[in-house]
Every structure is written in structure tokens, then in C-alpha cells.
Amino acid sequence: MILEKGKRTIINMLDLAAEHFSTYNYVTHKTDAGWTHFTFSEVRDNANAIAASLLNIGIEPKHNVAILSEGSPMWVISEYAALTIGAVSVPLSVKLLPDELPYRLDHSEAKAIFVSKNNLEKVLSISHKINNKELILIYLNEDVDDFREKIRAAGLKAECGFSFWELVDQGRMLLEKSSDAVLEIRSKIAEDDVVNISYTSGTTGNPKGIMLSHLNYYSNAKDGIDAFKLPERFRTLVILPIDHCFAHTVALYGALFKALDLYFLDTRGGITSALKNIPINLKEVKPEFLLTVPALTGNFMNKMIEGVKEKGDFIYKIFDRGLQAGCYRNGDGFSKPGGLNQLLSYFPYKLASALIFNKLKGIFGSELKYMVGGGALLDIKQQQFYSAIGAPVYQGYGLTEAAPIISANTPFIHKMGSSGGIMPGVSCKIMDDKTHEAEEGKIGEIVVKGDNVMIGYYKNQEATDKAIIDGWLWTGDLGFIDEDGFLVVTGRNKALLISADGEKYSPESIEEAIVNSSELIGQAIIHNNQNKFTSAVVTLDPLKVKNLKNKPVSEVYTVIKREVNAFKKDPAYKGQFPSKWTPAQFYIAPEPFTEENKMVNSTLKMVRYKITES
């Protein structure tokens, strides 16, 4: 389904999907009664009802409305409801610490927040810290009496709390009387209007709010659907957080084009229970494709290998030889070995497939065709492993500012070790500097242009102007286009830390805390490029370090370690930083970072990629 130019909005797509796929299941979640389905028309109708109620309680076009919840049909309906009346969604990660919420709620000037049971206490605990003392809370679960009691105990006004399903019922009655107000607003929604403000860590202390439009999402979702040639009613289990742009574009909005059947991970017991539910839900749902991140597929791979080893040496040898044969037969996915070599690897591969690989693939359900990896770069060993067992993972590349897909490997054309071909609606060039393109095959900064490029950063024109120049988005990532036309991402020229599961965090505030809390440390840079732990590289003040000259090495180490971690006990920084981003290990640089050794640029800023690579 395609919309004509000028009408390419998410709301128009929802209407079209509700018309064409009316009775098809759209979003499904697990309840005490089992898997509960919502069709495309039910999602649209409930969203319209909530939209009418939002208008009735004072939410207007251009108002910002936050959502803090695990993925669920109510999450989806909540966002569509906001968009239906021209409001803007502010999706928030359930992994945020309570102290990380006030900035996002204040900066976005959120008028309301949809919140789930698992996150209610978090919101209530910071309600006194935010500017909007009249913030409207809309509760997504059904234990409404408990919700109202907690609202009262937190000292909030009763009129600030609403039940999601009560608003649905009220909205239906309002629409029965008159739908004119909702219809009038809907008719004025433009494809360049903002859909949501996605807060992601930038290179400064506070996160930036990335504004993505209807056209941004429409064009990128269409690109993804077209590139993967997804059939109608393709089924998936949504494991990734729905606030992530990747899941938003491919799953939530991609579904509108092809009636994708979305099942949400069972999160009723919180994050810990959700992780345990992944293998259970995979067996129940039997997804045909999955959106995933390297940390998850890596964990599955390691457990599968451990399981095979437990079967004994004989089985493991069959597995290992079959895996090698499979890797050899697949080549890099783009270029495969010739006939004789294919013949020689045939028997060990087929034997391992029959005895082992098919059972391993069954962990993901019996109907999985492939997985799509995003959020962080996928190690080539994972790509080889999953291709060999018949559950390939196709690596893509993107960033939220690009809504997010820039390139992707697909079942039809792929090359292991690359991030795939550039999306049809995206133009890409590799820049050596701000004015010159890099030579063919040479590494430079990845720069892109297209309808997918963000509107800009919310309330931050300066950062927007730095990121987008003449319509081109400077990604801050390094890479090159190889001889076969595939994009190869080689590293990041940005400061962002990236954990193994693709989460990102700005390091500057932690670095400043380390230096400011220590008399010994002169400079600090922290680094995480898809690892389990964050590392720090520190330089020592030449004058202060003289005091340690005659002390035993063990004592010197203890002193430096204490200095690196001093910020954790500093009252000024107490509770500010999630523990996963604070350094678990540190290295001492042999000399301070200076312009002379090219570790500092002309503006005295540390050149991160040079320091971390040295």
C-alpha cells in the first residue's frame, strides 16, 4: 500500500491498514487468559476513542505526551491516539533510572504520560522533581483501584490520574455524540509534522531529543519492507523495546504496509521475567522473522554451543565439522565457493544439519526464516554460525537520526562482514573531511540524505545545524563502500558508549566526574564499543604523581584505583550514573594527551578514536 505525496502520514497508513486488513491480528500480548489479540481495526478504533478523551482532558495538537511502558497493544494504541489529535509522542525507555526521567519530562514539557504497572512507582517517585505539577498519568493496566491508591499516597491530585480503559469507554461516548473535533484535527496533520521525540544520548551531558516526522517513518518503513520483500501477515515476536527506533520503524509502522502480525514479549513480571520468557515465548509464537541485537544472539549462540558440548565429544565433533563445512559452503554470502568444494563439504554439513542444526534452529520456533540485527555491529562469527544452522542474521546499520535504517543485508543480497546495501530512499557518501569525499574504498565519515533524515534536535538548533548540513546528515560513524557496493562500518567517530545490547550513553559527564573528584587524574576518557564492561583510559598529573615515585607498585595501583573510583563516593555525583556505564577497568596512558602527540585537537578536545585505538 502506497500513499500519494502530501498524504504520507502514519495516521493515514493506520486508516488504510484498518480498512484493508480489518480483521487481521495486528498486536498481541500475553495475559492471565493467554495470548490476547487486537486487530488492525480494533487498534484504530481504540486509538480514536483515546484521542477523543485526550482532547476532553486538555491535550491539544503539538502537545507532547510521554509513554513509559513495556511493549504492548496499549503502548501502540497510546501512541496512535496522541498522533490522531496532532500531539507528539515521547517514548521513554523502561531501563531509565528514576533520576533520568525528570530531564526528559521537563525538556519535552510533557503534558501527560502513559505508564504501565511496572513503571508506575518510578514515575511517582520523581513527581515532585518535575516542573509540571499537573502532569496527567494514564494507567495502562487494569488494577485501577491500586493505581488510584498509589496516586493518593504519593500526594498527587486524584484528577491527575486516569485509567486507559476508562478513557476508551469515555472516548467512545464522546465520538458517538460528535467526532467533528477529532476529524478536523486529523485532516490538518501534515507529513512533515513531528511523530515523536526520541531521547538518545548525545556527546554532551544531557540527552538530545530527536524529532522524527511522519514522512521520516513512512519512507524508512517502506524502504525496509521493500528491501526485505516481506509477505503479508509475516509473524514476529517483538523482543526489542518498542521505544527503540528500529522496532518502531520495522515492526510497529512496517506492519501497516503488510499486515505484519506482532506478538509482544511477556513482560508482566518486569525486565528480569521478560528475559526468562524469551525462549518460552519463541516456542509459543513460532515467529517467522525476528528483530534482534548482537548481545541476544550472542547469548543464544554461546548457550547452544555449551549444550552441544554436553552431549559428548562425538556429537561435538559432528557439530564442529558441520559448522566449518556450513561456513565454507556459505562463503561470505555474496561470493560462494565453487562446485567441487561444495561437494566436499556436503556430507559433513548435511549430517550435522540432520542431527544437530535443525534442533538448534528449533530454539527459535519451528518456522523462523531469518533474523535482522541492529543496534550494534554484529560479529562476523555470529553471522557465520547462524547462517550455518539455517537461521541467518542479516546485519543492518542505522541511527535514530535516520529513522533509523541506512543500509541492510537482506535474504536476497548480503555479504557477511558488511552492513549491507544502502536503502533505496537513502543517498550515501563517504567524506574525508567537511568538503572532500574520500577516495573510492577509503575510510571516511558516513554522510546520508533522504526523506528518512530527522527534522532536527528538539530545542537545540545549534546541534541540528552541526549534524545536518545542506540536507546531509553527518552520522559521526566511520566506514567505506567496498568493491561490491556494500557499506562497511569500521568504527565510530562519536563519543557515544555502546553496550553489548546496543544501548548508548554519553560519557562526558562521567569523565568530568572522574577528573573533578580526583587530585591525581588529569584526563579521563571512557570507552565501550559493544562490550560487557566499560573501560577508562586516564592520564596522571605529572606533578602529583611524583609523590608516588618511591612507593611499591601494589600501593601505587591501589591509590590510582581509588582515585579513578572517587567520584562514586562524591556527594555531587551520587546516583547520577548507571553502574553499567561506570568503568570496570582502567588503563594508565604513558603520557598526557596533547596536541603534540595528536591526542588533542586544536580546540583542546580529546580525539577519542585515536586514544582508544592507541
Image: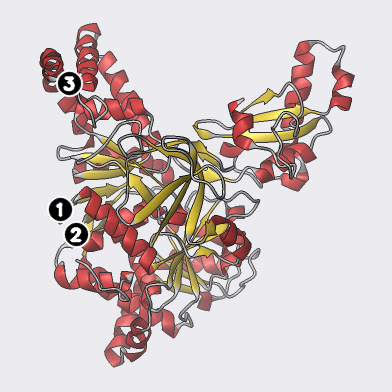
Q: Earlier in the sequence, mark 1 or mark 3?
A: 1
Residue at 75 percent across and 20 percent down: it is 558
Residue 542, relative to residue 570: is it above or below?
above
Cβ atoms under marks 1 and 2 closer than 8 Å: yes
Find disc 3 in the rendering and name its residue. Answer: 356
Q: Residues within 10 Å of mark 2 (few under 14, many from 20)?
A: many
Q: Nearer the viewer, residue 161 or 59?
A: 59
Q: Position of residue 403 (x, y in %)?
A: 40, 56
Q: Quadrant of residue 42?
A: bottom left
On the image, the x and y values in percent for residue 40 come to 21, 67
The amino acid sitting under disc 2 is Lys
Q: Position of residue 346 (x, y in %)?
A: 11, 17
What residue lies at 48% left-to-right and 41% top-to-bottom? 438
Disc 2: which residue: 258
Q: Is residue 169 above or below residue 217?
A: below
Q: Amino acid at mark 3?
A: Ile
Residue 223: name its quadrant: bottom left
Disc 1 to disc 3, C-alpha distance:
29 Å
